[in-house]
């Protein structure tokens, strides 16, 4: 076993006790237990048992991320498929190997050169961004952006073979910069979220491409339709969005300013996260038209404690009367509990930083600066740099308040005829619990293990949320992109949630190590798993690994 693998640790809330233990691979002597005094957990036990059982290594890492980003699983052939954004290859991972080992199995993989298969005289391959496998396991789709940042992208379809190999079928034209691809649950449609970012800024001659969603209808002769946001461009429609606290760049038309990030859907309706706008768009999949756009709201840091001081070297959550977190969700998930649909959001936050333009407003309190509103000062006990959102450059915000990117939480919304109703938010759980489990690495970054490094800028940074059923219990899994690891919550009737467990297998012995910066997740139910138990796959974009975690419900 390599030194890196031997030193990986999993921090778990132990069943029936109020302390955190350190577990390592069986053939390595256990490290001393770290005991938490007066932990004060809402639940005194963990209903979930979680252990790492497999690992795939890409053989590369990158501080800027983008190595292994998105992963999906084919239940028909027992292989996982992961996007390697650095090599441009699609990795095929044999998950059946998990049945052959005890402890952590080193998984093997082969590469598919998607570029060579899809590039032709009409399309110059730029970047592969996402992968999805159809519910029946017969078809795989990948989203591909053009080399020209303002040109239409492609979604490429493949037949999944029994040995894991892929047979190229065809491509369809999408909108600009497809960033995510998914199937409807019945497999009849493929959807892509086309981000349309202004990658060369807003200067003369630069293009801000229109954001859109592409729908490939496999049941109707594989027709592809791209739906944009021009219906919201009128002055009245735009003002209505601003009145609902949807964040728009001043002077920008919604059709070019809105940037679809992620899609969660049933067979009738798709929900699309518009991250920078702090909103969710609702798309009718029968009429191929948007039914509305709804704000996901703000975290109120006058009531919820947050740590924005990166210089004191510890967790110190405080409230600030003028401070709000703009949730700006990245990945979202749709689930049904008791016959009611709920939408879960991973509230990451995202700035716009392009050539000649940046909407960040960084203030260094150690140099006597104040927050943009002037209401937060060094007298509040702050000494380091905090990155605020420039509210004056955006409509839909209150310039008398201060805004952070993201809310360091995940939220649950009840879906109704009139939009989204918030029923749960994890509040400051992610900061308080990672400080408890990993006090030496609290709010460290994914390329630097220095404590508190990210406190002034998005903290642990929740990235992705997926749901799954473990022994009849509905569970939400949320990745933390910076410090790493996966938070787990049991989902309860009414959309409430209860913290269940946390696992972090990042190698903290170096700034960049294995299982660093989990990006994409895939839950595999026990019925489809090669081990016969539920699995969670985590694609780690900085460390260049895919970690496989086995999850069981312990009955308590």
Image (cartoon, grey):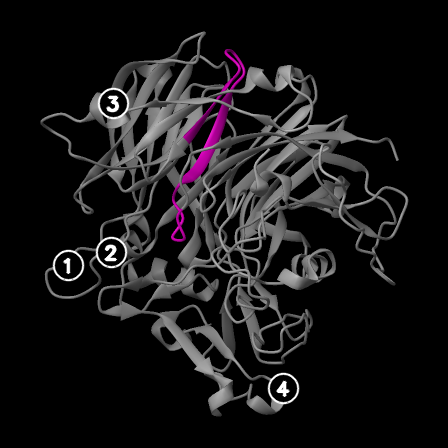
Label 2 and label 4: CA atoms lie apart by 38 Å
Mark 3 — residue? 171
Q: Quadrant of the C terminus?
A: top right
| Sequence-first tag of 4 and 3 | 3
User: Toward the viewer: 366 or 249?
Assistant: 366
SS at badge 4: loop
Residue pictured at 59% horizontal, 39% vertical: 5
Segment tinted magenta in the rendering: 62-82
Q: Is residue 31 magenta?
A: no
| Sequence-first tag of 2 and 1 | 2
Do the residues under discs 2 and 1 have CB atoms within 8 angstroms? yes
Task: Count numbered badges in the picture.
Answer: 4
Specify few, some or many for label 3: CA neighbours under 10 Å numbering under 14, 14-19, or 20 or more.
some
Label 2 and label 1: CA atoms lie apart by 8 Å
Mark 4 — residue? 381
User: Toward the viewer: 503 or 186?
Assistant: 503
Tell me, for residue 206, which label it has, or none. 1
Mark 2 — residue? 198
| Sequence-first tag of 2 and 4 | 2
Give the number of the mark in front: 2 or 4: 4
Do the residues under discs 4 and 3 have CB atoms within 8 angstroms? no
Label 4 and label 1: CA atoms lie apart by 43 Å
């Amino acid at each position: 076993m390599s030194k890196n693998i031997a030193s990986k640790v999993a921090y778990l809330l132990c069943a029936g006790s109020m302390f955190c233990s350190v577990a390592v691979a069986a053939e390595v002597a256990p490290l001393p237990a770290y005991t938490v005094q007066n932990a004060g957990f809402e639940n005194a036990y963990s209903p979930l048992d979680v252990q790492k059982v497999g690992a795939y290594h890409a053989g590369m890492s990158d501080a800027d991320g983008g190595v292994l980003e998105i992963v999906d699983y084919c239940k028909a052939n027992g292989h996982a498929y992961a996007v390697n954004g650095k090599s441009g290859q699609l990795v095929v991972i044999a998950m059946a190997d998990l049945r052959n080992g005890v402890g952590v199995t080193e998984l093997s993989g082969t590469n598919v050169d998607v570029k060579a298969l899809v590039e032709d005289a009409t399309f110059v391959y730029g970047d592969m961004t996402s992968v999805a496998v159809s519910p029946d396991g017969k078809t795989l789709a990948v989203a591909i952006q053009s080399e020209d940042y303002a040109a239409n992208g492609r979604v490429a379809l493949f037949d999944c073979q029994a040995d894991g190999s892929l047979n190229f079928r065809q491509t369809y034209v999408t909108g600009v910069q497809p960033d995510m691809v998914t199937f409807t649950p019945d497999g009849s449609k493929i959807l892509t979220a086309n981000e349309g970012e202004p990658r060369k800024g807003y200067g003369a001659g630069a293009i801000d491409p229109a954001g859109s969603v592409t729908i490939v209808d496999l049941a109707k002769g594989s027709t592809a339709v791209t739906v944009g946001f021009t219906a919201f461009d009128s002055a009245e429609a735009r003002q209505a969005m601003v009145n609902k606290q949807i964040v728009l760049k001043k002077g920008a038309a919604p059709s070019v300013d809105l940037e679809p990030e992620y899609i969660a859907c049933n067979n009738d309706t798709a929900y699309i996260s518009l991250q920078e706008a702090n909103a969710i768009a609702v798309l009718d999949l029968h009429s191929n038209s948007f039914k509305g756009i709804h704000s996901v709201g703000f975290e109120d840091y006058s009531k919820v404690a947050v740590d924005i001081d990166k210089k004191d070297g510890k967790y110190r959550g405080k409230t600030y009367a003028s401070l709000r977190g703009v949730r700006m969700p990245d990945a979202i998930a749709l689930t049904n509990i008791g016959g009611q649909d709920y939408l879960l959001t991973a509230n990451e936050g995202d700035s716009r930083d392009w050539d000649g333009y940046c909407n960040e407003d960084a203030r260094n309190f150690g140099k006597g600066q104040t927050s943009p509103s002037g209401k937060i000062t060094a007298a509040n006990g702050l000494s380091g740099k905090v990155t605020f959102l420039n509210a004056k450059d955006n409509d839909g915000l209150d310039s008398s308040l201060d805004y952070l990117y993201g809310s360091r939480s995940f939220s649950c919304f009840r879906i109704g005829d009139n939009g989204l109703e918030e029923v749960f938010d994890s509040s400051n759980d992610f900061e308080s619990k990672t400080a408890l489990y990993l006090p030496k690495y609290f709010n460290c970054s994914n390329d630097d293990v220095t404590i508190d490094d990210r406190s002034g800028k998005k903290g642990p940074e929740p990235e992705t949320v997926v749901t799954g059923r473990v022994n009849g219990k509905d569970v939400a899994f949320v990745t933390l992109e910076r410090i790493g690891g996966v938070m787990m919550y049991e989902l309860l009737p009414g959309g409430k949630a209860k913290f269940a467990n946390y696992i972090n297998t990042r190698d903290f012995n170096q700034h960049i190590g294995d299982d660093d910066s989990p990006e994409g997740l895939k839950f595999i139910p026990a019925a489809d798993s090669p081990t016969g138990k539920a699995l969670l796959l985590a694609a780690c974009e900085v460390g260049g690994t895919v970690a496989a975690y086995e999850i069981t419900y312990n009955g308590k």
